[in-house]
Image: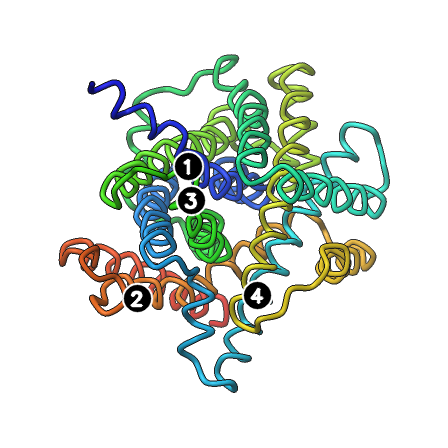
């Protein structure tokens, strides 16, 4: 009987894995590898803290969509008057563009490493393949898209964790990295980028929309408490995987690439990995980076469409939206900007946008009028407020250190 009660939950897993793939996008690769190669194990605690924060945030987002049947963007679209709603949409759209920049540029770098393709051509190919992935969801349904994304996650896991088996980290220094500390302004910049690349604002919007239909066929016969329990399992499993991948990137860089020249770019990282860990590990790294770019830009496009639909009631054709969000990435590449640095800066932009998604999420899920019997318990609300406070404090510190 216990087995029969648990089996339906397996079919309910999936939405969090779509969200989780955005947590291992090329922006994460750039920030985590840069953090490890420049500061060793110093920022291990930031990766761990960011992932714990992400579990809470993504559960609240999924819970909001499931209980109310409406996404976070939809709630904001209803509650904000026209002027503030448009301004709110503009900042959310800027976040979506920054997200797309990281993912498309990352895919372009991977294609350059694998096939020596020009970055501009690689960016276009990445965007085109992402459209095909999204089409799977449109034609075959969300469950099919979830399976494709899970396949990408397996590919990414193999590629990004391979280095750990070739050159395992020492336990002592790794444990020391769990003690909170910084090493100057640049480490604060990277810490903010790591959090921005982990507690990603566009996925806060997206996850709430992915669960709005969970009371349909897959959730039939399940009580709301059972659905929420399945969602907690979904979020924890997905983000444990994402957290392990992010941590492995930083640890591999700290163990094998620390202090070596050329690790400030992904191309340089690939070259150093080739010389230090072997061509096989470098090939897996490049393949995983490509999978990361393709999968995450698909998720980013879906998030941008959800934000526009929820806040403005407008849904652009996929091709048009894809072209509009691709333009900034092509401009950045066309101007000759260093792609890996652009990835890190894009993650800082994401971090600045987190409070605009996180604060409304906390307020809505703490409201009995909105959530009914499933309103947050006080400890949950307090924990969510602490997360928001940490993010805002990091952003203020980042801006202060940057301009002074």
User: Element type at marker 2?
Assistant: helix
Q: Would you call the spot at circle 2 few (<14 residues within 10 Å), some (14-19), or many (20 or more)? A: many
Q: Could you tell me if the residues under marks 2 and 4 are in contact, i.e. CB atoms within 8 Å?
A: no
Which one is closest to the eye, mark 2 or mark 4? 4
**Residue 305 position (above or below residue 231):** below
Q: Would you call the spot at circle 3 few (<14 residues within 10 Å), some (14-19), or many (20 or more)? A: few
**Which of the two labelled residues, at mark 4 and mark 1, occupies the earlier sequence position?**
1
Q: Could you tell me if the residues under marks 1 and 3 are in contact, i.e. CB atoms within 8 Å?
A: yes
Residue 294 appearing in the image = no
In-front residue for pair 218/71: 218
Q: Name the residue under label 1.
A: 218
Q: Name the residue under label 2.
A: 364
Examine the image and state in which quarter residue 392 appears.
bottom left
In-front residue for pair 163/372: 372
Which one is closest to the eye, mark 3 or mark 2? 3
Residue 309 numbered tag: 4
**Which of the two labelled residues, at mark 3 and mark 4, occupies the earlier sequence position?**
3
**Residue 169 position (above or below residue 13):** above
Which one is closest to the eye, mark 3 or mark 4? 3
Which one is closest to the eye, mark 2 or mark 1? 1
Residue 216 numbered tag: 3
**Which of the two labelled residues, at mark 2 and mark 1, occupies the earlier sequence position?**
1
- Taking the image as shown, residue 22 lies to the left or right of residue 386, namely right
Q: How far apart are marks 3 and 2 (CA)?
A: 23 Å
Which one is closest to the eye, mark 4 or mark 1? 1
Residue 238 numbered tag: none
Residue at point 67%, 19% (across, down): 275
Residue 45: x %, y % from top left? 33, 40
């Amino acid at each position: 009987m216990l087995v029969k009660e648990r089996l339906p939950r397996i079919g309910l897993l999936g939405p969090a894995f779509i969200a989780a793939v955005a947590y291992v996008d090329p922006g994460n690769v750039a920030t985590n590898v840069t953090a490890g190669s420049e500061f060793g194990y110093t920022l291990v605690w930031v990766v761990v803290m960011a992932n714990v924060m992400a579990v809470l945030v993504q559960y609240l987002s999924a819970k909001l969509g499931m209980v109310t049947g409406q996404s976070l963007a939809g709630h904001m679209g209803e509650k904000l008057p026209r002027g503030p709603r448009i301004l709110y949409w503009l900042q959310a759209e800027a976040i979506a563009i920054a997200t797309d920049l990281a993912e498309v540029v990352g895919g372009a770098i991977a294609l350059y490493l694998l096939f020596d393709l020009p970055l501009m051509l690689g960016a276009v190919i990445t965007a085109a393949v992402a459209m095909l992935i999204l089409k799977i969801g449109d034609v075959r349904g969300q469950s099919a898209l979830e399976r494709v994304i899970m396949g990408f996650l397996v590919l990414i896991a193999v590629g990004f964790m391979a280095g750990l088996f070739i050159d395992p980290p020492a336990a002592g220094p790794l444990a020391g990295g769990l003690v909170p500390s910084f090493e100057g302004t640049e480490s604060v910049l990277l810490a903010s980028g790591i959090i921005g690349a982990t507690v990603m604002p566009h996925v806060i919007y997206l996850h709430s929309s992915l669960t709005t239909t969970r009371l349909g066929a897959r959730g039939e016969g399940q009580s709301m408490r059972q659905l929420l329990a399945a969602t907690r399992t979904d979020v924890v499993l997905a983000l444990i995987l994402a957290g392990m991948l992010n941590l492995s990137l930083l640890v591999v860089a700290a163990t094998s690439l620390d202090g070596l020249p050329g690790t400030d770019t992904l191309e340089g990282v690939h070259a150093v990995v080739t010389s230090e860990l072997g061509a096989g590990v470098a090939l897996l790294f490049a393949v995983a980076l490509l999978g990361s770019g393709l999968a995450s830009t698909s998720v980013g496009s879906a998030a941008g469409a959800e934000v526009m639909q929820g806040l403005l009631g407008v849904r652009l054709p996929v091709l048009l939206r894809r072209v509009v969000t691709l333009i900034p990435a092509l401009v950045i590449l066309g101007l000759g900007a260093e792609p890996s640095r652009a990835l890190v800066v894009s993650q800082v932009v994401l971090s600045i946008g987190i409070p605009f998604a996180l604060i409304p999420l906390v307020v809505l899920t703490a409201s009995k009028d909105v959530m009914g019997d499933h309103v947050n318990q006080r400890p949950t609300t307090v924990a969510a407020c602490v997360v928001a406070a940490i993010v805002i404090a990091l952003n203020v510190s980042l801006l202060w250190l940057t301009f002074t």
